[in-house]
Image (spheres, rainbow, N blue to C red):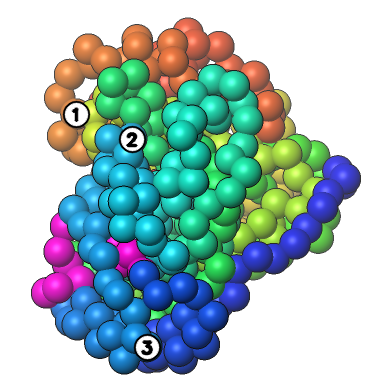
Amino acid sequence: MNKFVFSYPTKVYFGNESVAQALNIALADVGKTVMLAYGGGSIKKNGIYDIIKELLLNAGKNIVEFSGIMPNPTYAKVQEGAEIAKSNNVDFILAVGGGSVIDCCKIAAAQAKTDEDIWEMEFVKRQLPKSAIPIGAVVTVSGTGSEMNGGAVITNEKLNIKTGLFAGAPKFAVLDPAYTLSVPFKQVISGAFDTLSHCMETYFGKPQECFISDEINESVMRNTIRNIRVLLKNHEDMDARSELMWTSAMAENGILKIGKVTDFQAHQIEHQLGAYTNCNHGQGLAVIHPVLYRHIYSESISKFARFAKEVWKIKEENEKSAAEKGINALADFIKEIGLPTTLREMGITNKSCFESVAKSCNITAGCCKKLSSKEILQILEECFDNLAAA
Ligand code: NZQ
Ligand code: ZN
């Protein structure tokens, strides 16, 4: 187990109609001007916008709006949000949406507090912002776990780079499973797979030996898999939606990462692919994971064998064979839940960007095998048609 420092900055309000409780308590001691940030308009259709607006007005807040935050938020959108926050002297940012809205707000909140360009500061100089406007998150689609951490994934369109930047974690997060009922079901499953991916990317990090964080992780993975299956049978099962909303937060709130150097190689490949194709995050991960794992598992056979046994309940004495069966079980599950198994299925119809994606993809320190750009290119090629999955 590696050295670690752990603290918990985000207060969570979980459950039916918890938004009123959260806003009444959490906004009592913040300034008067609140920036209400959201995406392309789903919160107006499902009524969440009206509920929140009324709560803010009743709390005596001035509302400034920042809308139109797109999936895979761009750096230009971050700058737009920062400018609105700055010019209106915003005291607090309320991000209402999924990972895209929350991420965009985290970095806009930091950008609004400095004249220095945040991309330059973080990506080039490797420095973190010193201050940010405080933010709160109301989650309307789960999977990323962004609501309980300080990371934000932003696409710099000019540079063709999609990467993680860091600012403050939300002061509070509202998790009301009923808010997810209007999410297109395909996106619900894609988000839930993102959760499973976060678990796996942490589990297969270093050290490879299993300890408390990994044992908790196995439980979160089993729970996520079980509840995806429940939800497939009954889309409105609120217990399954609740559990998936919490596993989403659990996978990315840092608890599973305690004492680990995480892997996140699949994410790095997906993010760069996203920079070039704007593809859906969870779907991209679903295609990449089995292909990547077939490339790397031989460097971590015992852990992959344990994954097979503890997560997929595979009974197999021979470790290599167990490891392979575990990866096959993951690939079968991806098919079972209707996620794509090839990039082609996702609508990526040509390979022209693969070389650039491979060259610009970050190679992670936590992956059991240090990949080369050439291997990443090979993985992308295999993902394109993925004959092994057919
Ligand atoms: O924009 P609106 O109209 O709100 O529609 C959104 C969007 O089209 C819709 N949606 C959200 N809540 C809804 C709803 N539709 C109906 N009813 C509701 N209640 O869902 C679509 C997807 O939203 P988005 O926020 O893009 O999804 P997600 O939460 O999956 O976020 C993806 C982004 O998060 C990043 C991804 O890379 C991607 O950019 N990630 C962030 C992480 C983090 N900060 O910790 C970790 C992740 O690994 C991930 O990389
Ligand atoms: Zn993810």
Q: Where does the magenta region start and end?
A: 34-45
Q: Quadrant of the C terminus?
A: top left
Q: Is mark 1 within 8 Å of ligand 1?
A: no
The image quadrant that residue 340 belongs to is top left
The answer, for residue 230, to whether it is visible in the render is no
Q: Is residue 210 left or right of residue 162?
A: right
The image quadrant that residue 186 belongs to is bottom left
Residue type, numbered disc 2? Tyr
> Disc 3 vs disc 1: which is toward the camera?
3
x and y percentages locating residue 223 in the rendered image = 54, 70
Circle 2 Cα neighbour tier, 10 Å, few/some/many (<14 / 14–19 / ≥20): many
Q: Residue 108's mark? A: none
Circle 3 Cα neighbour tier, 10 Å, few/some/many (<14 / 14–19 / ≥20): some
x and y percentages locating residue 95 in the rendered image = 36, 64
Q: Label 2, on which residue?
A: 75
Q: Secondary structure at mark 2?
A: helix
Q: Label 3, on which residue?
A: 59
Magenta segment includes 298: no
Q: Secondary structure at mark 3?
A: loop
State which image quarter holds ligand 1: bottom left
Q: Secondary structure at mark 1?
A: loop
Residue type, numbered disc 1? Ile
